[in-house]
Image (cartoon, rainbow, N blue to C red):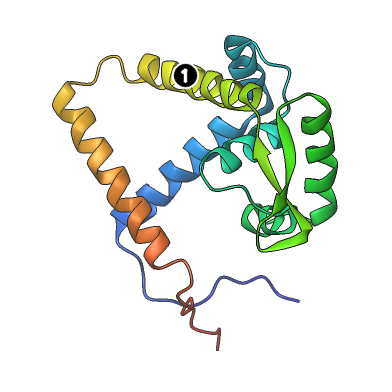
Amino acid sequence: MSLQPPAAVPLPATVVEIERSLSRVTYLAGRARQHERLMSVAGLPLDRAAVAILRHIAESEPMRPGVLAVRLSVEASHVTRQLRQLEQGGYVIRIADPEDRRAQRIQLTDLGMVAVERVREASRRGLETALVDWSSEELEQLAALFRRLVHDFVAHAEDPIDIPSAP
């Protein structure tokens, strides 16, 4: 199978630069060393997968483990294993699903909510340090642009990608 790039209409240089920058920020934020630093500041012994699960649960209603796996784009067995550890640590509990008593949903405990807040605060402090030289106007503009970017990503998340095939 050939991995030749599709012959497409050239993209604007600004789109290329934005994609490169987002890719770099994503890489830097997701590094193991960055996570270790974040956990050190937050004072928590959680791995990256556990943090992602806790943050996701905190931003939604209690949900079934299978739904959580789909939303995180991971295998259900991965979520099950992580949830077992988080449950043993006292961060989450299983509650009956009000729509189907045979099923369970996952909910944060008070300890889980405190852990999420500590992670968020440590993350915000890291951002504050990185953006210390930005003016309040620049920060407001960046926040507005990020809100718009997230909105537009969500709005177009299911759009088909039109990539012309190679001749």
Q: Is residue 56 above or below residue 41?
A: below
**Dot 1 alpha-carbon crowd within 10 angstroms: few under 14, some 14 to 19, many 20 or more:** some
* Residue drawn at (43%, 76%) of the image: 8
As rendered, which of 70 and 6 lies closer to the eye?
A: 70
Residue under numbered circle 1: 121
As rendered, which of 105 and 101 lies closer to the eye?
A: 101
Of all residues, the one furthest to the bottom in this rendering is: 167
Q: Quadrant of the C terminus?
A: bottom right
The quadrant holding residue 138 is top left
Q: Is residue 160 left or right of residue 97?
A: left
* Residue drawn at (61%, 22%) of the image: 115
Residue 75: percent from left, percent from top:
79, 56
Residue 20: percent from left, percent from top:
44, 46
As rendered, which of 64 and 55 lies closer to the eye?
A: 64
Q: Quadrant of the N terminus?
A: bottom right
The three-letter code of the residue at mark 1 reads: Glu
Of all residues, the one furthest to the left in this rendering is: 137
